[in-house]
Image (tube, grey):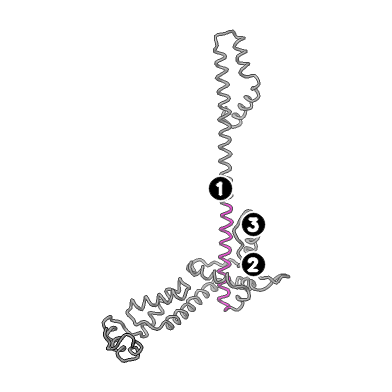
């Protein structure tokens, strides 16, 4: 577009009346509307839709831009988009916090409030113990994990949060809670403090149960594998015994079938069984105990 001046005079162009006239032409050509109250509601609606599942403010800004472009509104300054995103995110999160607190009983609220207060001679807090990562569960740490689960089950509440928060928001709130020590939790708004505490408590308890269940499954599989190996070994032994018995029986029958005297037959059978009679009897008894021989 020729606006009547060289490109190096863009600053002058921006300050001139020509820029305003050209923008009007472009807006008319592209059917772009100036941002009005309806457009600002479009911004807020887009930010709110994103805030229901996202926490990053830039995701909310991007969603606002998408909605404004779709509705053919003039884009506002970035500061306005950022301000709206922050405001809407705070409002949506406050609604989520309130929803979590609404399902807590007075006793559960009291139990949660005790988490960020020091106990014991070392002035440690249950909250810092809760948010600490116990690490990967192993055979060496399973007793400590069971003790930890008993502590959670007997001294801490177990709020039911199913269906209250989208999984993405629960993960985001859980991460935020893990990064806050007890002193920082005390400075938060009451509702947010209780909500983050409840969310992390459920997260830690579910993870611990999953880890213990996984350990149990591995143990059962190991037992099953050991049992199969033991069964396979016994099967090999059984076949070996059967082979010995069948081979011996064959030799006895061949010795009996020889066209010789009874004495020769007896000596042939004796030669076959000599020194092996106890072993053969044990093999027969093993088959009887296994129910193979009736």
- Asked if residue 34 lies left or right of residue 168, the reply is left
Q: Quadrant of the N terminus?
A: bottom left
**Image location of residue 169, percent across then percent down:** 49, 70
Mark 3 lies on residue? 141
Point out the stretch of residues depicted in magenta: 188-216
Q: Residues within 10 Å of mark 3 (few under 14, many from 20)?
A: few
The tag earlier along the polypeptide, 2 or 1, is 2
Judge whether 270 appears above or below 178 on screen: above
Q: Looking at the image, which is closer to me, 54 or 291? A: 54
Q: Residues within 10 Å of mark 1 (few under 14, many from 20)?
A: few
- Asked if residue 192 lies left or right of residue 41, the reply is right
User: Which residue is at a point 45% across and 72% down the rendered structure image?
Assistant: 52
The reply to whether the C-beta atoms of the residues labelled 2 and 1 are less than 8 Å apart is no
**Image location of residue 141, percent across then percent down:** 64, 57
User: Which residue is at a point 58% across and 39% down the rendered structure image?
Assistant: 230
Instruction: Determine the CA span between mark 3 and mark 1.
Output: 19 Å
- Which secondary structure lies at badge 3? loop
Of marks 3 and 1, the one in the foreground: 3
**Image location of residue 193, percent across then percent down:** 58, 75
Judge whether 287 appears above or below 15 on screen: above
Q: Looking at the image, which is closer to me, 41 or 77? A: 77
User: Which residue is at a point 61% across and 18% down the rendered structure image?
Assistant: 272
Mark 2 lies on residue? 129
Residue 200 highlighted magenta (yes or no): yes
The tag earlier along the polypeptide, 2 or 3, is 2
Q: Quadrant of the C terminus?
A: top right
Mark 1 lies on residue? 221
């Amino acid at each position: 577009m020729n606006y009547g001046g060289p490109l190096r005079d863009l600053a002058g162009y921006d300050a001139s009346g020509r820029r305003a006239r050209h923008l009007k032409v472009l807006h008319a050509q592209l059917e772009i509307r100036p941002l009005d109250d309806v457009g600002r509601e479009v911004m807020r609606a887009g930010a709110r839709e994103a805030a229901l599942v996202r926490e990053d403010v830039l995701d909310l800004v991007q969603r606002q831009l998408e909605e404004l472009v779709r509705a053919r509104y003039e884009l506002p300054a970035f500061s306005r988009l950022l301000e709206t995103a922050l405001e809407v995110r705070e409002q949506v999160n406050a609604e989520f916090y309130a929803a979590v607190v609404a399902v807590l009983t007075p006793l559960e609220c009291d139990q949660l409030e005790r988490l960020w207060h020091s106990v014991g001679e070392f002035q440690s807090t249950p909250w810092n113990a809760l948010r600490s990562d116990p690490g990967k569960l192993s055979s060496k740490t399973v007793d400590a994990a069971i003790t930890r689960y008993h502590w959670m089950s007997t001294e801490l509440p177990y709020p039911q949060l199913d269906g209250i928060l989208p999984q993405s928001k629960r993960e985001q709130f859980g991460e935020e809670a893990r990064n806050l020590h007890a002193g920082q939790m005390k400075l938060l708004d009451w509702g947010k403090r209780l909500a983050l505490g409840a969310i992390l408590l459920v997260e830690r308890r579910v993870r611990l149960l999953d880890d213990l269940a996984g350990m149990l499954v591995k143990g059962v599989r190991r037992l099953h594998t050991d049992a199969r190996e033991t069964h396979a070994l016994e099967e090999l032994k059984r076949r070996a015994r059967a082979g010995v018995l069948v081979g011996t029986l064959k030799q006895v029958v061949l010795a009996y079938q020889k066209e010789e005297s009874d004495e020769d037959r007896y000596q042939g059978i004796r030669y076959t069984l000599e020194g092996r009679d106890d072993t053969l009897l044990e093999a027969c008894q093993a088959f009887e105990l296994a129910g193979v021989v009736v």
